Image: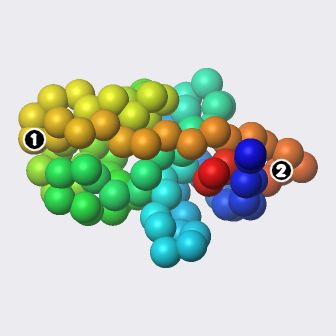
């Protein structure tokens, strides 16, 4: 069963950037791709639990600010050392200028 939560206004996430969202004791990262689609992953790097929202977004890649580990934010896949554990991803929808994530 879906559990849609309003995360932010769509325009709060710049194109090709990431924004942090905290809810229920958990941190999420919300991304806006170059082609204007929105994605969501766990907000902490699977390597050393650093906030990914402080990282660098390039195309569909988020780079962790601590050890430069990279993930494909569209599917959560770890892209090489030092990260080797994928990120969980969450469904996203945009309605009425707001971004919602399904945290179920």
Q: Is residue 36 left or right of residue 56?
A: right
Res. 49 image quadrant: bottom left
Q: Is residue 93 visible?
A: yes
Q: Is residue 84 left or right of residue 24?
A: left
* Label 2 secondary element: loop
Relative image position of residue 97 (x, y in whole percent): 83, 50
The residue where tag 2 is placed is 97
- Most extreme residue toward the bottom is 25
Relative image position of residue 2 (x, y in whole percent): 74, 47
Whether residue 78 is situated above or below residue 19 in the rendered picture: above
Q: Is residue 72 left or right of residue 85?
A: right
Give the residue drawn at x 55%, y 29%. Answer: 34
Q: Is residue 79 left or right of residue 36?
A: left
Q: How many marks?
A: 2
Whether residue 19 is situated above or below residue 86 in the rendered picture: below
Relative image position of residue 13 (x, y in whole percent): 60, 52
- Viewer-closest of 25 and 80: 25
Quadrant holding the N terminus? top right
Give residue 82's mark. Answer: 1
- Badge 2: how crowded within 10 Å, few (<14), some, or many (20+)? few
Whether residue 69 is situated above or below residue 12 in the rendered picture: above
- Most extreme residue toward the top is 35
Nearer-N-terminus badge (1/2): 1
Whether residue 31 is situated above or below residue 60 in the rendered picture: below
* Label 1 secondary element: loop
Mark 1 vs mark 2, foreground winner is 1
Q: Is residue 58 visible?
A: no
Give the residue drawn at x 33%, y 46%. Answer: 56
Give residue 1's mark. Answer: none
């Amino acid at each position: 069963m879906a559990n849609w939560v309003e995360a932010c206004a769509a325009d709060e996430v710049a194109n090709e950037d990431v924004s942090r969202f905290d809810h229920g004791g958990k941190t999420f990262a919300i991304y806006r791709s170059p082609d204007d689609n929105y994605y969501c992953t766990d907000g902490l790097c699977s390597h050393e639990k650093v906030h990914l929202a402080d990282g660098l977004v390039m195309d569909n890649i988020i780079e962790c600010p601590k050890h430069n580990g990279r993930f494909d934010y569209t599917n959560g896949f770890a892209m090489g050392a030092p990260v080797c554990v994928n990120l969980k991803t969450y469904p996203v929808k945009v309605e009425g200028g707001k971004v919602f994530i399904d945290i179920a």
